[in-house]
């Protein structure tokens, strides 16, 4: 499973001109399930995302996690947006291949699982809409943008 996370001052997602999810300070997480991913990869990705120390402490050092910062609640917000295009393979030609992405039904299932797990452990979670044409607005803070990938474990 993979994600690109962005530390944001604020972010929102719109579908057909309507805001469906928004946060103040926190993380915008673009999330993609790949072929072979399971709940185990989703759990590891979420745990890493929540503990990643990329917010500044009082000394200006990146020592705080999204759970440690105040985003108009007890912690910073998470805005989780599905984005299968993260699985793009651009090695051949000019048209990206998305064959590495999970099939749509499996991608939706793992995305929903990821969101449910996030909501179970983090108080401020907003989302986009799976497979919708979304417009994402954000004020990147830093900018801090970090790609993350959790590879499926071979048995």
Image (cartoon, rainbow, N blue to C red):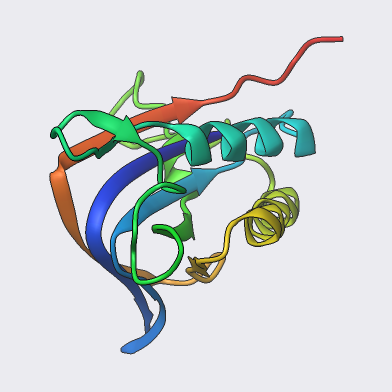
Q: To which quarter of the image does residue 95 belong?
A: top left
Quarter holding the N terminus is top right
**Residue 135 or 44: which is nearer the viewer?**
44
- Residue 16 appears in the rendering: no
- Residue 13 appears in the rendering: yes
Residue at the front extreme of this rendering = 58
Q: Is residue 71 left or right of residue 155?
A: left
Which residue corresponds to the image point at 35% horizontal and 52% vertical from the top-left? 69
Residue at the right extreme of this rendering = 155
* x then y, percent, for residue 5: 36, 42
Q: Is residue 26 left or right of residue 102?
A: left
Q: To which quarter of the image does residue 21 belong?
A: bottom left
The number of numbered badges drawn on the structure is 0
Q: Is residue 38 left or right of residue 26?
A: right
* x then y, percent, for residue 139: 16, 60
Which residue corresponds to the image point at 19% horizontal and 28% vertical from the top-left? 61
* x then y, percent, for residue 153: 75, 15
Quarter holding the C terminus is top right
**Residue 25 or 146: which is nearer the viewer?**
25
**Residue 60 or 21: which is nearer the viewer?**
60
* x then y, percent, for residue 49: 49, 37
- Image height of 49 relative to 69, above or below: above
- Image height of 133 relative to 19, above or below: above
Q: Is residue 9 left or right of residue 93?
A: left
Which residue corresponds to the image point at 54% horizontal and 31% vertical from the top-left? 48
- Image height of 110 relative to 65, above or below: below
**Residue 100 or 31: which is nearer the viewer?**
31
Which residue corresponds to the image point at 77% horizontal and 39% vertical from the top-left? 39
């Amino acid at each position: 499973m993979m994600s690109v996370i962005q530390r944001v001052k604020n972010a929102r997602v719109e579908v057909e001109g309507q805001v469906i999810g928004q946060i103040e300070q926190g993380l915008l997480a673009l999330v993609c399930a790949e072929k072979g991913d399971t709940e185990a990869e989703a759990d590891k990705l979420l745990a890493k995302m929540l503990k990643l120390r990329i917010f500044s402490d009082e000394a200006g050092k990146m020592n705080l996690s999204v759970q440690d910062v105040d985003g108009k609640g007890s912690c910073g917000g998470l805005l989780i947006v599905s984005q299968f295009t993260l699985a793009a393979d651009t090695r051949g030609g000019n048209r990206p291949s998305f064959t590495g992405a999970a099939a749509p039904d499996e991608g939706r299932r793992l995305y929903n699982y990821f969101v449910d797990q996030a909501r179970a452990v983090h108080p401020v979670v907003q989302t986009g809409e799976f497979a919708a044409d979304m417009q994402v607005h954000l004020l990147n803070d830093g900018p801090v943008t970090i790609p993350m990938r959790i590879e499926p474990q071979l048995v």
